[in-house]
Image (tube, helix red, strand yellow):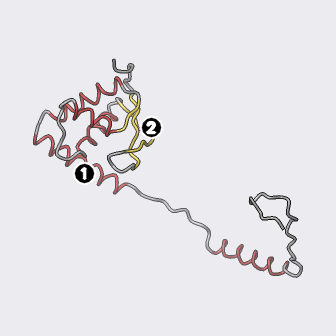
Amino acid sequence: MRPITAISDHSLPPLELDLVGWEPVVGAIRKQIAQKREEQPMQQSVLDFTAARAERDAGMNRAHDAAARRDDEWPDLAYGFLYRYATTHAEFISEELTAMADRMGYGSPADPRAWGAIFQRAARAGVIERIGYGVSQRRHLSPTPLWRSLVFGGNAA
């Protein structure tokens, strides 16, 4: 007999199951399953993210407020930078923008979560919208929000 090289190898004869006498057993099992379904209907879990969102927002706001206490101009400068970045980048993740801000000398807050409040402000203002997820290199390839610019006017020169 030659070895089977793939699961879909049809050169072997089909298996013939001998189920003679099993019909009453199968019928009884099906009846028990139907009774359990009637007794315990399947319930879908509902996840409530309200508390998690509130904690996320509170953390972003604390980081934002701390950055504003260190430099009261930083929030408006950061928002302005995000707006200008969005005019020249159709889609981006936050770390692309923050890395560019660092390279251009806009400074960075002590806690990078302060940028979260800036992104939320821009989203509420209709500058950007979340369209899915990108991959963060800084966070070990974790998913991170992917943003689409709503003010994109073309690529940077």
Residue closest to the eye, 16 or 120: 16
Residue closest to the eye, 108 or 152: 108
Q: Earlier in the sequence, mark 1 or mark 2?
A: 1
Residue displayed at 19% across by 39% down: 108
- Number of callouts: 2
User: What amino acid is labelled 2 in the image?
Assistant: Ile
Residue to which mark 2 is pinned: 131
Residue displayed at 77% across by 63% down: 4
Question: Where is the C terminus found, in terms of image quarters?
Answer: top left
Picture coordinates of residue 77, whole percent (x, y): 19, 30
Residue to which mark 1 is pinned: 59
Q: Secondary structure at mark 1?
A: helix
Residue displayed at 48% across by 60% down: 46
In the picture, residue 94 is in which quadrant? Answer: top left
User: Considering only vertical position in the picture, is 22 above or below 143?
Assistant: below
Picture coordinates of residue 150, whole percent (x, y): 39, 27
Picture coordinates of residue 33, whole percent (x, y): 70, 74
In the picture, residue 72 is in which quadrant? Answer: top left
Residue displayed at 80% across by 81% down: 25
